[in-house]
Image (cartoon, rainbow, N blue to C red):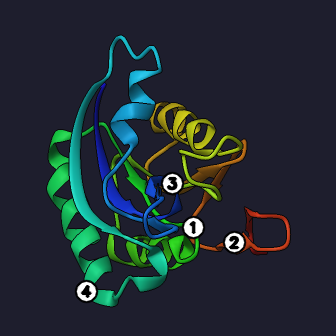
Amino acid sequence: MKLTILTTGGTIDKTYNEYEGSLLNNKTIIEEILASLRLPDLFIKYVRVLNKDSLDMTENDRSLILNAVETAIPSSDGIIIIHGTDTLSITGEFLNNNLPDLHIPIILTGAMRPYEFKDSDAQQNVTEALFASRIAPAGIWLTMHNRLLSFPGVVKDRRNLTFIKNK
């Protein structure tokens, strides 16, 4: 399987800067997560699109993500987008509105807690996105916390720190 992983930053990639006492988006951690998994027949291409908190994303940033997806589609069996959870739904809706007639699954995922944190959901969510990229039909999807939700209508459930389908 040929998979493209697009990274945009978000909580999943945040690292703690002990000198400043802050969490920053300085680098992506996706290769570190994938190195801990057994993926014998997966060929992955990484594309770093952005490296920012999703609260700081603009419409121009979403257009960059759309362009990266469009560029990756011809050479991919699936695409995973690593994205911050605060505006993931906005990006998912944007992609859903601008990518008609898809023939592969596009999976968005992220984490509520940074990968570096002991209680992070990052590895679980990335693993679920990898599996979803194999089984989901063509379309725009979110996978997180043992859920596979199709766009449109996916929203962040801030009370329960997960995502749900808005009915």
Disc nearer the start of the sequence (4/1): 4
Q: What amino acid is found at the position of numbered circle 3 in the picture?
A: Ile
Mark 1 or 3: the one toward you: 3
- On screen, residue 79 versus residue 45, left or right, reads right
**Residue 44 percent coordinates (x, y):** 26, 32
Residue with the mark numbered 3: 12
Q: From mark 1 to mark 3, how far is it between C-alphas?
A: 9 Å
Left or right of residue 56, residue 1 in this image: left
State yes or no: discs 3 and 2 in contact (Cβ < 8 Å). Answer: no
Q: Is residue 110 left or right of residue 104?
A: right
Give the residue number, with chain letter if any, for mark 4.
60
Reading the chain from its start, which is encountered first: label 1 or label 3? 3
Which amino acid, mark 1?
Thr
Mark 2 crowdedness (10 Å alpha carbons): few <14, some 14-19, many ≥20: some
The residue labelled by disc 1 is 85
Q: Residue at x 34, y 88 (%)?
A: 58
The structure residue drawn at horizontal position 46% and vertical position 31%, both measured from the top left corner, is 134
Q: Can residue 109 be spotted in the picture?
A: no
Closer to the camera in the image, 87 or 10: 10
Mark 3 vs mark 4: give the one in front.
Answer: 3
Amino acid type of disc 2? Lys
Badge 3 marks a residue whose secondary structure is helix
Residue sitting at 57 percent across and 67 percent down? Answer: 85
Q: Are marks 1 and 2 in contact (CB under 8 Å)?
A: yes
Q: Amino acid at mark 4?
A: Asn
Q: Residues within 10 Å of mark 3 (few under 14, many from 20)?
A: many
Q: Which disc is residue 156 wearing?
A: 2
Q: Residue furthest bottom?
A: 59
The x, y position of residue 116, in whole percent, is 54, 45
The residue under the point 25% across, 79% down is 63
For mark 4, give the secondary structure. helix
